Amino acid sequence: MPEITPKTKAKPQQLRAEITASNIVETTLYLTEVDKISLDKISMLDVAKKSGYSVGAVYRYFKDKNDILNKIFGFYLGKIHRTCVEKLESFPDSGNCRQLAILIVDHYLEDLKHRNINNVLILYKIFMQNVSRPEQVSSAVDVLIAPIHNIMLNDKTGTFKTPNINEIKINLRGLSYMMRSTYLEQNPYGFTSEYREFLIENCTLLFGNAHH
């Protein structure tokens, strides 16, 4: 869903349309992740019943099921990053760099742990085949830059390095790629305690003061 700025303020009707489309996508994700219905078995009727919209309303926003599936991976990326931002915005000034690393790493690992890898692979493939800008997979994590920058600026522990926007961006994208590739490759190492500690140590090094 596009960001709403003062220059491009959405009209109420446009907002309702965006909310409806988002609800339909989220419902489809719910059907496969929670109700455990395989992607090939989900129908537009299933989506309509679960979402509370009529079948006609669903077709008004999406031409067919594949059109919905094409939007799910992007929706999921936005949601997992937004919920991480919410946690970062509540991070205390007294929190140190390792605590920040644990927050970030555990947020993503816990979410991925509950995803159906086969569905994720299918949705990822559909997304990459249809998205106009494939780099969106990497750039989606950029929403974490501002809150992490603020945490580093307000550091009271002396455990963070001097914040640099470009470094934060590069480090975040690298960390995101590391977790994403390990997961999509279905590497059994990906959910071990050793892997978690490896990610935490690397995240701490990326954002931390070398003297702590």
Image (cartoon, helix red, strand yellow):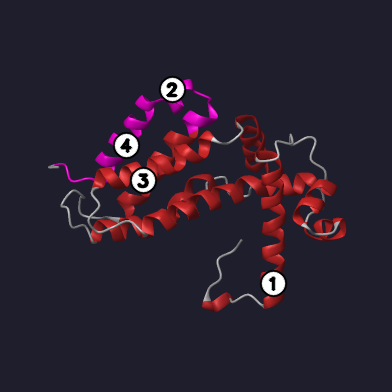
Tell me if residue 174 can be seen: no
Above or below residue 115? Residue 10 is below
167 relative to 59 in the view: left or right: left
Q: Which mark lies nearer to you, 3 or 4? A: 3
What percent of the width, then of the height, locates residue 210? 16, 41
What percent of the width, then of the height, locates residue 59? 83, 56
CB under 8 Å between discs 1 and 3: no
How far apart are the alpha carbons under marks 2 and 1?
45 Å
How far apart are the alpha carbons under marks 1 and 4?
42 Å
Q: Which mark lies nearer to you, 1 or 4? A: 4
Q: Which mark lies nearer to you, 1 or 3? A: 3
Identify the disc placed on residue 44: none
How far apart are the alpha carbons under marks 3 and 2?
20 Å
What percent of the width, then of the height, locates residue 154? 23, 61
- Say what amino acid the circle numbered 3 marks: Leu
Q: Secondary structure at mark 4?
A: helix
Magenta part of the chain: 181-210
> Is 194 within the magenta?
yes
> Is 123 within the magenta?
no
How far apart are the alpha carbons under marks 1 and 3?
35 Å
Main secondary structure along the magenta-highlighted residues = helix
Q: Secondary structure at mark 1?
A: helix
Tell me if residue 47 can be seen: yes
Residue in the image at 18% along x and 57% along y: 156
Q: Dot 1 corresponds to which residue?
A: 14
